[in-house]
Image (cartoon, rainbow, N blue to C red):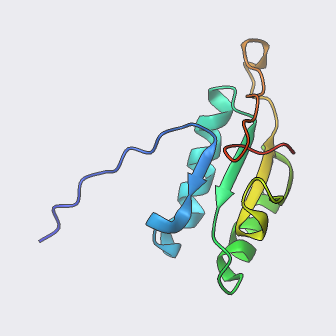
Amino acid sequence: MNDLQPVEIPIDGALDLHAFSPKDIPTLIPEYLQQCQQRGILEVRIIHGKGTGALRRTVQALLSSMEMVTAFRLGDETSGGWGATLVRLRAGKDSSAQRSRKPTPGSAPGA
């Protein structure tokens, strides 16, 4: 019996992948980043954890193929270190009303 309900993810510039299956990553990340871009959130932190680095490599390979991504890098000591990737997005088509979200310590990238 599959009674799983969709989970609403807050679009706030921080995506924690710990709650998701690795098979969901190829669709989850592009959809999340698109929603951020549409809301004018152009700096995003993706939390993948440290572990063996396999998920980090998957995330970064995906990011490198996405046109909406202008840059990405590992987090620093205030944003998750190598357990998080900080992403900068290209302004969307309706960018005149959009602006980059100001980062707060520990919640968004300073990329």
Q: Position of residue 7 (x, y in %)?
A: 34, 50
Q: Position of residue 42 (x, y in %)?
A: 75, 35
Q: Would you place residue 103 above or below residue 83 in this image?
A: above
Viewed as shown, does residue 8 lie left or right of 78? left
Kindly indicate the quadrant of the structure image that contains residue 28: bottom right
Q: Would you place residue 90 above or below residue 67 in this image?
A: above
Q: Residue at x 68, y 76 (%)?
A: 50
In this view of the protein, which residue sits in the foreground, 24 or 13?
13
Give the farthest residue toward the left: 1
Viewed as shown, does residue 39 lie left or right of 63? left
Q: Position of residue 100 (x, y in %)?
A: 78, 27
Kindly indicate the quadrant of the structure image that contains residue 94: top right
In this view of the protein, which residue sits in the foreground, 14 or 105?
105
Q: Position of residue 39 (x, y in %)?
A: 62, 26
Q: Residue at x 81, y 59 (%)?
A: 77
Q: Residue at x 60, y 55 (%)?
A: 29
In this view of the protein, which residue sits in the foreground, 55 or 79?
79
In the rendered image, the quadrant that contains the N terminus is bottom left
